[in-house]
Image (cartoon, rainbow, N blue to C red):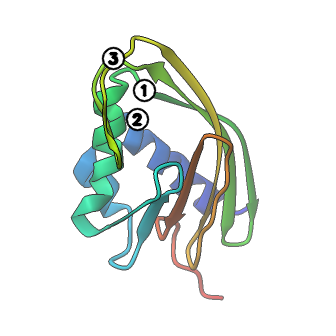
Amino acid sequence: MNNNNVAAVRNAYAVAERKDLDGWINLFTPDGVFVDNSVGATYRGRTLADPVRNYGTAFSNMHRELYRIYADGNVVVVQLALQGTHNGPLRLPFGELPATGKQMDARAATCSSSKTARSNASTATRRVQSFLPSSES
């Protein structure tokens, strides 16, 4: 297991948990992307902060429970759950969902790589690129 890559991914989740928008943006390389497949949106540059801001507003107590982390070379896969109370507006491509007061426990998986990235999950899927340390290979 590449401990530098695992540490970088753990740090990325910690930065999102703190809702540190500039810190989140700074984790990505200039060509880094974040794809939220659950809403069909791709974020680059300053818009990388949008999903952290949006979900942080909709779920003010958002927690990312990391269950398992797997690493193979430049690839890190995380099994996790996004947990919180829907107590604020959630912006979606088709409009805004007002707060429901309901608890969320959305199981997800992410796959991060310093070169490419893909992820699949049942309810919340993301593709994150480039917050892992650069590789020589």
Q: Which residue is mark 1?
A: 62
Q: Is residue 24 above or below residue 44?
A: above
Residue depth check, mark 1 versus mark 2: number of the one nearer the observer: 1
| Residue 3 location, quadrant | bottom right
Q: Is residue 46 above or below residue 126?
A: below
Badge 2: residue crowd in 10 Å (few <14, some 14–19, many ≥20): some
Q: Are marks 1 and 2 in contact (CB under 8 Å)?
A: yes
Mark 1 or 2 closer to N-term? 2
Q: Which residue is mark 3?
A: 87
Residue depth check, mark 3 versus mark 2: number of the one nearer the observer: 3
Mark 3 or 1 closer to N-term? 1
- How far apart, in angstroms, are the residues tagged by discs 3 and 2? 16 Å
Q: What residue occupies the far bottom of the structure in this picture?
A: 137
**Which one is in front, 19 or 2?**
19
Badge 3: residue crowd in 10 Å (few <14, some 14–19, many ≥20): some
Q: Which residue is mark 2?
A: 17
> What residue lies at 44% left-to-right and 62% top-to-bottom?
34
Mark 3 or 2 closer to N-term? 2
Secondary structure at badge 1 equals loop
Q: Is residue 106 left or right of residue 14?
A: right
Percent of width and height locating residue 135: 58, 81
Percent of width and height locating residue 14: 44, 40
- How far apart, in angstroms, are the residues tagged by discs 3 and 1? 10 Å
**Which one is in front, 66 or 107?**
107
Q: What residue occupies the far top of the structure in this picture?
A: 101
